[in-house]
Amino acid sequence: MASVVVVGTQWGDEGKGKIVDLLTEYAEYVVRFQGGNNAGHTLVVDGKKYVFHIIPSGILYEDKTCVIGNGVIIDPKVLLAEIGELNDKGLTVTPQRLLISTNAHLIMPYHQSLDLAREASLSKGKKIGTTGRGIGPCYMDKIGRVGLKIGDLLDPGQFADKLQAVVEEKNFILAKQYNAPTVDVELIIEQFSRYAAELTPFVGNVSMVLDAARKAGKNILFEGAQGTQLDIDHGTYPFVTSSNTIAGNACIGSGFGPAHIDEVIGILKAYTTRVGEGPFPTELPEGDGVGDALQQKGHEYGATTGRRRRCGWFDGVVANDAVRLNGLTGFAITKLDVLSGLDSLKIATKYQLEGRDYDHMPENLRIAQKAQPVYEEMGGWSGDITAARCYDDLPRQAKEYLARLEEFTGVAPAIVSVGPDRAETLLLRNPFQR
Ligand code: GDP
Ligand code: IMO
Ligand code: MG
């Protein structure tokens, strides 16, 4: 029996969806614990592609239970659309297969309006480049104690009272501050009563269910969203998301005790990408041959917004931050295949600015934005590696690259991914078989 947390180690889109899908084979429960539909997790099984924004990436296995924890924020329209799409594909989502925490907060229509209006009002250089899904405003209301929860849907009178109280303020801000359209309370009540009818069968006490599962010896997999450098406390603030993305939040965001976590696997792309604004020391700007090659070969477009992802060399500083902040016990190194064909590869081992060395992401935004990476160079390899299924199938230089990442971070890869498909994977050590 084991509880395993999977988190992104960089700026998101490391391939968490693929690895969670892969590991679900060995788990009985798959739990999302933070973020919302800003996430876009891609799975490819037998050439068929699925993208999930809110439903856990274990949903393709019909005999597993997917769980949405209290730390997740839910846009019910998006959730129901995702359930509907799965039903259309014959993967009927029943309450036995999906459990939603009573305490998960709702993304309301005014959250999305406020997210878009605020971003539009910011000048260049100040925009965060959010996904526009209402994430920041929803978490603000949660912390400000004026949020609405999934549980409130089960009590229509209370839902209407809470909504009435909060909409007045939201409409004031929308109209007066942003000159944006206001929202209509009655319309929201009508919309959300329909959502309530559809979602009620899925709602329950996640903490109690997970506790019972653990006591019954079940394997539990926690699926992080976003990545370590997007963490609200430890990331490149303010160019971050509005939740804690690191492993500690697996417990807070689901009501699971920290002493029961056995493994934390960090998903580490073999190079670096970022979508949205903010510091990115190893970035290869648009027009750079290698950066453009990574972007094209890696199909680096956002799974949620379709935006072009910025690309750059592997950043050992970011990797070591992730090791420390998440207490990683293993890596899943993804997209190694995308590096094939490059003559040489660079790894950033530290940053420098104004005569000072940095072995961690500088907390000062100005420094993080200007810091220059110091690289070491390694030999590349040619030829396609997507058919590799064990370590010895890899070319010598690819093995050397992996060995150097392990040496530099002190954490060994448990999984190496050489293509988007579930099958295109080297499982070196199974975190559930301890
Ligand atoms: P997530 O948000 O961390 O789940 O990652 P995304 O799904 O947003 O982005 C990762 C992309 O890389 C998806 O299109 C995956 O299908 C793809 N992918 C995952 N692992 C690999 C890999 O090892 N090689 C290649 N070429 N693509 C991969
Ligand atoms: P997954 O789970 C990559 C980024 C946005 C923006 C910042 C804030 O697929 O890895 P938000 O809408 O959250 O307020 O946007 O965070 N961002 C992501 N980048 N992958 C994600 O999720 C992301 N979720 C948010 O681009 O820079
Ligand atoms: Mg993604």
Image: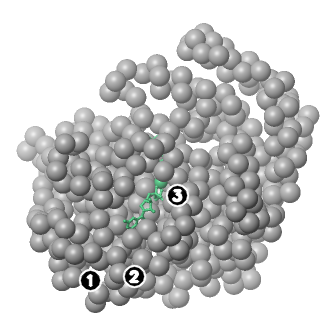
Q: Answer yes or no: disc 3 within 8 Å of ligand 1.
A: yes
Amino acid carrying mark 3 in the image = His
Q: Answer yes or no: disc 1 within 8 Å of ligand 1.
A: no
Q: Answer yes or no: disc 2 within 8 Å of ligand 1.
A: no
Picture quarter with ligand 1: bottom left
Specify the quadrant that holds the N terminus. bottom right
Residue 133 in sight in this render: yes
Location of residue 344 with respect to 100 vertically, above or below: below
Work out whether mark 1 precedes mark 3 in sequence or the reverse, and give the earlier one. 3
Residue 154 placement (x, y as % from top left): 87, 45
The mark total stands at 3
Amino acid carrying mark 1 in the image = Leu
| Number of the label disc, if any, that sits on residue 244 | none
Work out whether mark 2 precedes mark 3 in sequence or the reverse, and give the earlier one. 3
Element type where label 1 sits in the image: loop
Residue 315 placement (x, y as % from top left): 25, 58
* Distance in Å between CA atoms under marks 1 and 3: 27 Å
Q: Are marks 2 and 3 in contact (CB under 8 Å)?
A: no
